[in-house]
Image (spheres, rainbow, N blue to C red):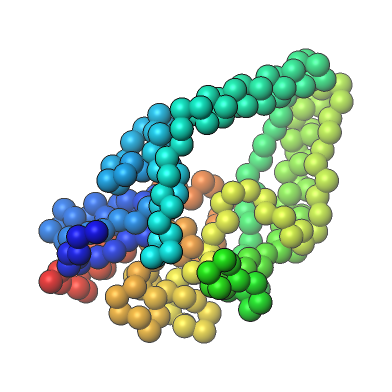
Amino acid sequence: MKQEQVDAVLVGSGAGGGIVAKELAVAGWRVVLLERGPWLKTFGHVETRDAWFTGIDRVPFGPERTDVRTVRASDREKARRATECALWQLKHFYRTYFPQSIWFYATCHTLPRAENRVDTDPEVRDARGVPVSRITYRQHARNAGEEQFMADRCAELLEEAGAIKVVKPRIVRESEAGISTHQLGSCRMGSDPASSVADRTGRVHGIPNVYIADGSLLVNPGGANPSLTIQALAYWVSAAILRDHTAS
């Protein structure tokens, strides 16, 4: 691999990383964007979903990871058939047992807990001997009340609409299961290093050249999809990087 000097290295091109990469590149910075996943071709060009089975499905990180491989056409066909079979079974289930049904989904506010965190496991290590990530999570005690309230209101709406049978979810107080896929706040921003990971600009406390620009900065997940907020934060962090650092 040809070695070149760069001004910034970004890990991940999600809702935040892609924006930061674009903002720095437009400002004249030489940026390297590291991404892992089968949507990336050999030379890092982002492709469409058609690249799912044709791009690299494992990107090497480090000298021991040199087994980059691509998915063969036969594997692609097997995956397609398996997907079609799973979809048919799902459709058959609903057509058989739920010929006339409706499902209500209500978004609730997931309150943060100081004890929830992502850290390194003190005992478990991966194949290279590196400590793996450990997730400690439990819902806030007040979450159950909000969830029960919304479940009851949804049930009332269904009954008013003429539903014959209403099945409400089983709500567990302080459950260890996540409510949705929008788990945020593992690197929350704040002014006190004792209770936060990054400052108000997304810069990690005590490290002048490491910034975070994704959902982990959010101190509170709220009750709505966080994508636009994450993107706004990415622009905020990009402006701070350009203001505080000069590309070499």
Q: Nearer the viewer, residue 173 or 56?
A: 56
* 222 over 69 or under it: above or below: below
**215 or 145, nearer to the observer:** 215
| Picture quadrant where residue 53 is located | top left
User: Does the rendering let one see residue 113?
Assistant: no
Which quadrant does the C terminus fall into? Answer: bottom left
Q: Residue at x 73, y 43 (%)?
A: 150
Residue, x 43% and y 64% (percent of image)?
64
The residue nearer to you, when weighing 166 against 139, is: 139
Q: Is residue 51 left or right of residue 33?
A: right
Q: Residue furthest right?
A: 165
Residue 192 seen from this side: yes
Left or right of 209? Residue 177 is right
Image quadrant assignment for residue 129: bottom right
Q: Please tell me whether residue 163 is drawn above or below residue 67 in the rendered image.
A: above
> Percent from the top left, x then y, of residue 81?
59, 22
Image quarter (top left, top right, bottom left or bottom right) of the N terminus: bottom left
Q: Left or right: 202 with respect to 157? A: left
Can you give x and y, in whole percent of width and height, for residue 43 in the image? Answer: 27, 46
Residue at 78% in and 48% down: 148
**Callout count:** 0
The residue positioned 52% from the left and 84% from the top of the image is: 194
Tell me residue 16's x, y (percent): 37, 54
Q: Is residue 145 left or right of residue 49?
A: right
Can you give x and y, in whole percent of width and height, for residue 74 in the image?
51, 27
Can you say whether 110 is above or below 41 in the image? below
